[in-house]
Amino acid sequence: MVLSITKLLPIEKELVKLITKNTLLISLLLLAITSNKVEDELTHKNRLKAFAGAFIFGVVFTIVSSTINYLSPYFSSPSNTGTTYILIQMFFIYFISLYTMKKGKREK
């Protein structure tokens, strides 16, 4: 028998979604700002590049998705994306780009 939290506790589903989203965002933020055992100038430079790339991606994604939503009678597009979705994408872009920069550093 499978029980869900909402059946056990009288909590609204929207509140559970909000708490889950905020917890995920705080966890990703803590992962992003933690430092390595060895921090040098190259590590700081790579972090800055990764943050800048993720920010630029977020801005471009927001502009493109807003334009597509504006032109939605002409194009089929998904519903309006929320800020949580965009922030999660930005964090993953940050982590992927930082990982590739670290991997490139190790191979040299």
Image (cartoon, rainbow, N blue to C red):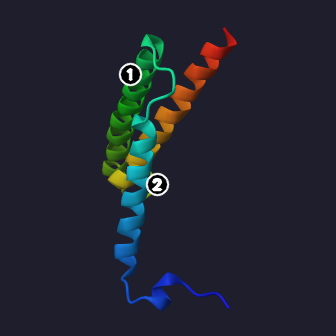
**Residue 79 can be seen, yes or no:** no
Residue 73 is labelled as none
Q: Residues within 10 Å of mark 1 (few under 14, many from 20)?
A: some
Residue at x 45%, y 56% (from the top left corner): 78
Residue 64, relative to residue 8: is it above or below?
above
Disc 2 target residue: 76
Q: Which of the two discs, 2 and 1, labels the residue nearer the N terminus?
A: 1
Q: Label 2, label 1: how many angstroms apart (C-alpha)?
A: 36 Å
| Residue under the image location 41 percent in, 44 percent down | 30
> Which SS class for mark 2?
loop
Residue at 46% in and 85% down: 6
Left or right for 25, reference 96 = left
The residue type indicated by label 1 comes to: Leu
The amino acid type found where label 2 is placed reads Ser
Q: Secondary structure at mark 1?
A: helix
- The image quadrant where one finds the N terminus is bottom right
Query: Residue 10 at x, y = what percent?
Result: 38, 90
Name the residue: 45% across, 14% down: 40
Quarter containing the C terminus? top right
**Residue receiving disc 1:** 48
- Image-based side of 68 in relation to 105, left or right: left
Is label 2 or label 1 in front? 1
Which is nearer the eye, 6 or 37? 37
Residue 30 lies, with reference to residue 4, above or below; the image says above
